[in-house]
Image (spheres, rainbow, N blue to C red):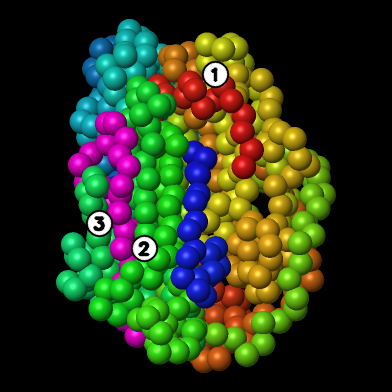
């Protein structure tokens, strides 16, 4: 994530910045999170060979079913196969090498139809991988990120065209396409060919020795091909002045904002409550923009009754917008906790209707005139008992051992993969990707982590890219950040400290002098983002294996007791201030745990291999 510069002006009495609050789950609004993906399944005669599942074809079908059943409902997935229309005799070769069928277009997934198409495949013929790659690419949309996942048990038996040449050809056409390949019990020749196809497009290659391995690998690779970002929320239209501002209750909303525009929203805040207002603008990737012209700024302000300026100002800046960042800004307003005294500032005190204004006031080159704007609004009651005193001692990292549990980081906060406690986790990033993981921290618990970037055969400064990691609070505020340059050799983040870490999570942390500790005062999901920036040469398309070492420690503690039930977003509060967690579709996740916390909107280009990281990658900076 691009480094943010934050400036906070708190002028009105009683305004406290950086007070975290748990956020509601985000309802998904459109299908743009998922890059359309085509599965290519080998149905040549050799797939009739035996496997623990029956035949290799049986094993491949089982693996596809597993993926289809677990794929997101809005995913766009198609199916192509080859080898079903002819036998594999020499007399049938000419026809067999044209035998490619698109069984399902890459539309929003129809699970039963896709599984039915897979079940009907009968392996018989030749292996025209190069032709199938072209046909699959034609079936995908003409623009935007796209993916192909190809499973084969051997090398191409129909060349020309050579499948690796086809992959290079597609990339040279400027297609935003990534090819992932899986070798299913393949020999060295086929392995080299499949690996070449993947590397030519910035994709990944995986070996599956048998059916059980394929059943584990295919869903993980296919899910990685789909990770991308989409804006979401309940539609709302902000006004150009406070008088026309729509009244918004607690929740997550979706609007748009134009360059230099200010949007107003109204929130009714009861006496004694704290209001939270978060704005998120996601910037598209724009390669080739000069770093000096690559800044965007958001500003938020609070207005009281009759539009009185409460002089509470927040400003956030994204310094590398063209790298696909989400710029977030959070306003914490405690005016309703103050008593009116009859003075001139009374319009900014006590219960009543307050107005939050958001301005996109600095605009970089190359961005669209309007962008999606996500809003997260919460109203938090006061507490009768804040629980244990605040603490500043960070959690210590205990380095785990072993190769690590494979995980697939997601393209956004709302889809972030859960890391189940202490341990070592492994993933693979393609150039240009941001991926997100989440860790639950209940009251009294803390985390520490470190990210290792493994060697990928890079060639020095020709393939330099920026690597970064950011730890976020449940509010979406940055707790810690580190970045460095990567040239294909092993690296680690953070570069200087043992780990990036939190203190034990306590409500009273919000009173700490350290601004980072103040962001560690709400239990819930904490987010780890890991970035592998794009290189500026074609030779820098090779994926990078990473491993993430994580420690989750601390004794569970009672949390705060709120003055009223209802929670920050209207959900029923449990004992000790532990609200019920809410899943993305609105269902209860776990009534015994603290609130599920979600922030919206970090743009991720998971499948794009674009030029762009030059200036920022050369300078390692630590917040």
What's the distance in space between the residues labelled 3 and 2, CA to CA? 10 Å
Of discs 2 and 1, which sits in the foreground?
Answer: 2
Mark seen at residue 464: 1
Q: Specify whether 534 is left or right of 280.
A: right
Magenta span has 445? no
Mark seen at residue 301: 2
Marked residue nearer the N-terminal end (1 or 3): 3
Image quarter in which the C terminus is found: top right
Number of numbered discs: 3
Marked residue nearer the N-terminal end (2 or 1): 2
Mark seen at residue 275: none
Helix, strand or loop: magenta stretch: strand
Tell me the crowding category of disc 1: few under 14, some 14 to 19, or many 20 or more residues within 10 angstroms, Cα based. Answer: many
Q: Residue at x 52, y 40 (%)?
A: 3
Observer-nearest residue: 93 or 146? 146
Q: Which residues are magenta?
A: 352-377
Magenta span has 376? yes
Q: For mark 3, what is the residue?
A: 262
Q: Specify whether 62 is left or right of 304.
A: right
């Amino acid at each position: 994530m691009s480094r943010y510069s934050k400036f906070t002006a708190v002028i009105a009495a009683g305004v406290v910045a950086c007070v975290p609050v748990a956020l509601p789950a985000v309802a998904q609004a459109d299908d743009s999170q998922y890059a359309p993906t085509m599965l290519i399944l080998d149905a040549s005669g050799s797939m009739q060979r035996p496997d623990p599942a029956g035949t290799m074809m049986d094993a491949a079908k089982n693996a596809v079913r597993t993926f289809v059943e677990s794929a997101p409902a809005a995913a766009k997935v198609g199916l192509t196969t080859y080898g079903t229309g002819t036998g594999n005799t020499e007399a049938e070769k000419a026809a067999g090498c044209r035998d490619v069928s698109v069984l399902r277009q890459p539309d929003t997934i129809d699970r039963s139809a896709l599984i039915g198409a897979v079940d009907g495949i009968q392996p018989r013929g030749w292996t025209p991988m190069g032709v199938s790659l072209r046909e699959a690419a034609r079936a995908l949309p003409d623009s935007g990120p796209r993916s192909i996942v190809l499973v084969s048990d051997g090398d191409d038996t129909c060349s020309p065209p050579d499948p690796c040449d086809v992959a290079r050809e597609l990339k040279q056409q400027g297609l935003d396409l990534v090819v992932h390949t899986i070798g299913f019990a393949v020999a060295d020749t086929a392995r080299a060919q499949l690996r070449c196809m993947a590397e030519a497009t910035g994709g990944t290659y995986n070996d599956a020795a048998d059916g059980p391995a394929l059943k584990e690998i295919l869903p993980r690779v296919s899910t990685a091909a789909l990770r991308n970002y989409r804006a979401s929320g309940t539609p709302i239209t902000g006004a150009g002045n406070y008088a026309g501002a729509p009244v918004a209750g607690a929740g997550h909303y979706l609007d748009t904002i134009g360059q230099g525009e200010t949007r107003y929203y109204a929130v009714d805040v009861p006496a004694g409550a704290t209001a939270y207002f978060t704005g998120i603008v996601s910037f598209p990737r724009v390669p080739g923009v000069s770093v000096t012209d690559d800044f965007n700024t958001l500003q938020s302000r609070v207005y009281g009754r009759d539009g009185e300026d409460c002089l509470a100002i927040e400003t956030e800046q994204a310094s590398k917008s063209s790298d696909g960042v989400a710029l977030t800004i959070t306003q914490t307003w405690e005016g309703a906790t103050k008593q009116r005294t009859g003075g001139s500032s009374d319009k900014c005190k006590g219960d009543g209707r307050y107005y939050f204004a958001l301005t996109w006031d600095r605009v970089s080159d190359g961005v669209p005139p309007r962008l999606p704007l996500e809003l997260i609004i919460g109203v938090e009651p006061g507490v009768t008992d804040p629980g244990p005193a605040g603490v500043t001692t960070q959690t210590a990292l205990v380095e785990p051992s072993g190769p690590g549990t494979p995980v697939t980081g997601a393209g956004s906060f709302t889809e972030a993969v859960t890391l189940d406690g202490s341990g070592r986790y492994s993933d693979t990033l393609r150039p240009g990707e941001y991926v997100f993981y989440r860790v639950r921290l209940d009251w009294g618990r803390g985390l520490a982590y470190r990210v290792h970037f493994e060697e990928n055969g890079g060639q020095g400064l020709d393939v330099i890219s920026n690597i970064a990691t950011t730890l976020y609070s449940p509010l979406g505020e940055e707790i810690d950040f580190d970045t460095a340059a990567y040239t294909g050799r092993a690296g680690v983040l953070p570069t200087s400290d043992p780990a990036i870490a939190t203190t034990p999570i306590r409500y009273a942390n919000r009173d700490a002098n350290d601004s980072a500790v103040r962001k560690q005062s709400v239990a819930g999901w904490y987010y780890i983002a890991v970035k592998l920036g794009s290189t500026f040469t074609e030779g820098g398309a090779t994926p990078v294996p990473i491993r993430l070492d994580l420690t989750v420690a601390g004794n569970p503690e009672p949390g705060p007791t709120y003055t009223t039930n209802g929670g920050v977003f209207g959900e029923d509060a449990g004992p000790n201030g532990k609200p019920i967690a809410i899943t993305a579709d609105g269902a209860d996740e776990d009534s015994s745990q603290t609130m599920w916390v979600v922030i919206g909107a970090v743009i991720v280009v998971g499948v794009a291999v674009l030029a762009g990281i030059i200036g920022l990658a050369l300078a390692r900076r630590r917040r």
